[in-house]
Image (spheres, coloured by chain):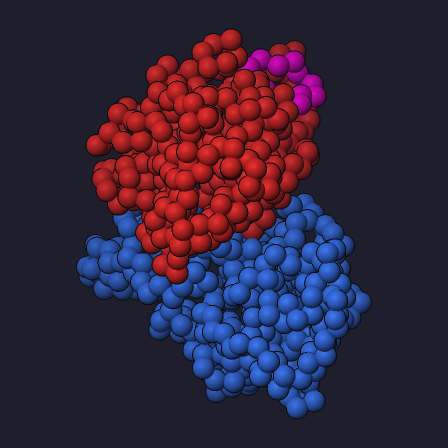
Chain colours: A blue, B red
Amino acid sequence: MTRHGKRADLIVHEQDPFNAETSLAALAEGPLTATDAFYVRGHGSVPEIDPAAWRLRVHGLVERELNLSLMTLREAFREREVVATLQCAGNRRAGLMAVRDIPGEAPWGAGATGTATWTGVALADVLALAGPLEEAAHVGFVGADPSDEAEPAQPFGGSIPLDKACRPEVLLAWGMNGEPLPAVHGAPVRVVVPGYIGARSVKWLERIEVRSAPWEGYFQDVVYRLLPEDGTPGPGAGMPLGLVALNADVLSPADGETVRAGPVEVRGYAFAGGERHVARVDVSLDGGTRWSRAQLLDDLGRWAWRHWRTTVELPPGEHEILVRAWDSSAATQPEDEAALWNPKGYVNNARPRVRVRAAP
Amino acid sequence: MTRHGKRADLIVHEQDPFNAETSLAALAEGPLTATDAFYVRGHGSVPEIDPAAWRLRVHGLVERELNLSLMTLREAFREREVVATLQCAGNRRAGLMAVRDIPGEAPWGAGATGTATWTGVALADVLALAGPLEEAAHVGFVGADPSDEAEPAQPFGGSIPLDKACRPEVLLAWGMNGEPLPAVHGAPVRVVVPGYIGARSVKWLERIEVRSAPWEGYFQDVVYRLLPEDGTPGPGAGMPLGLVALNADVLSPADGETVRAGPVEVRGYAFAGGERHVARVDVSLDGGTRWSRAQLLDDLGRWAWRHWRTTVELPPGEHEILVRAWDSSAATQPEDEAALWNPKGYVNNARPRVRVRAAP
């Protein structure tokens, strides 16, 4: 075990704030990611919170301000469970950094994502008690984790549209994979916003602010925005991220691996994000001229990725395995990773490729 | 005027069933498409319907079957207006046919799309009166237009998920751009499903069937499905289309046009489909190495495309103008049109390009 109850095979990008991604081998174990292998993207030190003293304040454009204890939250609302994939906007940044360096950003591979069963109450139910006013259009979340990454330093925060906040899948969660939410994942209570970038699933939740405008804090107004290639981060620059874009990667074999020539099993994940689902995954061995269909594995519901598998026949020699996923709008991934380069290294959703050597 | 009250500059693919697309010049006139220029995709002859005798039957998995006159529909429910872009799944098929022929399909250019103001009642309000049963999951629509394209011959039909059907933007519409819906567009009443392929916006609506499963008729179970390159149409083959995939095209200058060297205005449309919106449009003159930002024009609401414009400096000579749109999930369009080829020629959403000659 490394720190925070995590397995030793996590790839740690930073110790404090703790930032670590899941190994592809651990992701390949199955469509539900074990808690001790689940990626962590932190922006500040893990705060120590006494659950008995914890209060959740709900304020802003509401008829009735709330100040709820954990006990009230657990007793006054219906408990719900959602299987949801979280994915960091910086997932697969390493591929963009290979094109051109991105100083000051961690080189996340394809393991800044994972799927868990989350337990808690619907944010919608809490909002219904507070009663959003007519002008309410966004719901902001603030954590208990002051971050020096922000300018000025501030707790992590962000918002989602009220429309999304009122859907039953958005949780205030205290459980992960059937166990109490670990401290490093936001205990006592975190937000889980299925289909949205991980940054909106604010950990160590302390405050919910119902607003007329999107969040104006650093983590939504300056970062977690897609800049054009020649853009400079600044308040309101670029487009705000939110919905996750269709993405996929190969989990096995590993890039650079030597496999035995003959039939080789290829496995991976694909995640549609938003309200879409993965409709098809194709695999090509000739750079994209001919494609074969992979088999989509366990369907864990509309908020979870799909794992997929296929068997390809590899004669001895060097091979490149190229993959493309399709979502339920029949949209597929862009080809050219280099053309997706952006100054903060977000949303690399280019078609993944791994190079392998088949040994006789 | 050609038949059906349409302008002479429509590009007619077929007279009966009437199939005609809007000229790009007409689309370029503004973000709202004039009714007499709006594209038509028909699968059967335009039926003659007496509005006074017309009835709408609502049946299937409902507590209460309905059989409504047009007067009741107009008087008993709140009138609503939605600006929505419709787009045929075959829009831009000509680009795929240039890669490899698609026998038996019309070579639609980029004008199988348009945006209008639709007036009617929310399908949700009618469904609420009927009372969907617990097992209800899809809502099917049947028109009054028998089609010989189907095997066996049958009226046009299709379904959408109940979840979408209950959103306020889905209309049973009798008005288009402030005038009565013309016969060729589905009078007296058509469905308008914003964000979905045009095929779900069933014209000459006669029957609504609340179901547990998606529509099993020809126009959803056999066609309007994306097949893999080597697939063969058949019941349930390929993935059903529904949500529109992010798309864009250049409206001016035209492909092959000679323009005057110097500053040249480039205009076009971009449409995100589904619940997404267009977040950015980029233009490149060097094949995609450097991109500049186009200006997004009038925002007509979440169900409408965005027109865009930019000015590029073209020295004398040959040029290729390449465009890519981005949606609110930070997804962009695939590059390679050839790789999108499919046996029925649907969903060509590759980055558009036009070649122009700048004369000194």
Question: With respect to residue A136, does B125 lie above or below?
Answer: above
Q: Is residue A19 left or right of residue B43?
A: right
Q: Is residue A237 left or right of residue B351?
A: right
Q: Is residue B143 visible?
A: yes
**Magenta residues, as a range?**
B253-267
Task: Tell which of B245 and B115 is nearer to you.
Answer: B115
Query: At 44% across and 54% down in the image, what residue appears?
Result: B131
* The image quarter in which residue B18 lies: top left
Q: Position of residue A169 (x, y in %)?
A: 52, 65
Question: With respect to residue B264, does B201 lie above or below?
Answer: below
Residue at the right extreme? Answer: A152
Task: Tell which of B183 and A108 is nearer to you.
Answer: B183
Task: Tell which of A27 and B105 is nearer to you.
Answer: B105
Q: How many marks?
A: 0
Q: Position of residue A309 (x, y in %)?
A: 29, 60
Q: Is residue B74 left or right of residue A61?
A: left
* The image quarter in which residue A191 lies: bottom right
Query: At 69% across and 70% down in the image, what residue appears?
Result: A130
Q: Which secondary structure type mostly characterizes the magenta part of the structure? A: strand
Whether the magenta-drawn stretch holds residue B162 is answered as no
Whether the magenta-drawn stretch holds residue B264 is answered as yes
Q: Position of residue A74 (x, y in %)?
A: 58, 82
Query: At 66% across and 16% down in the image, what residue appears?
Result: B261
Question: With respect to residue A67, does B308 lie above or below?
Answer: above
Q: Position of residue A100 (x, y in %)?
A: 58, 52
Quadrant of image for the C terminus of chain A:
bottom left
Query: At 65% across and 46% down in the image, what residue appears?
Result: A228
Q: Is residue B195 visible?
A: no
Question: With respect to residue A210, does B319 lie above or below?
Answer: above
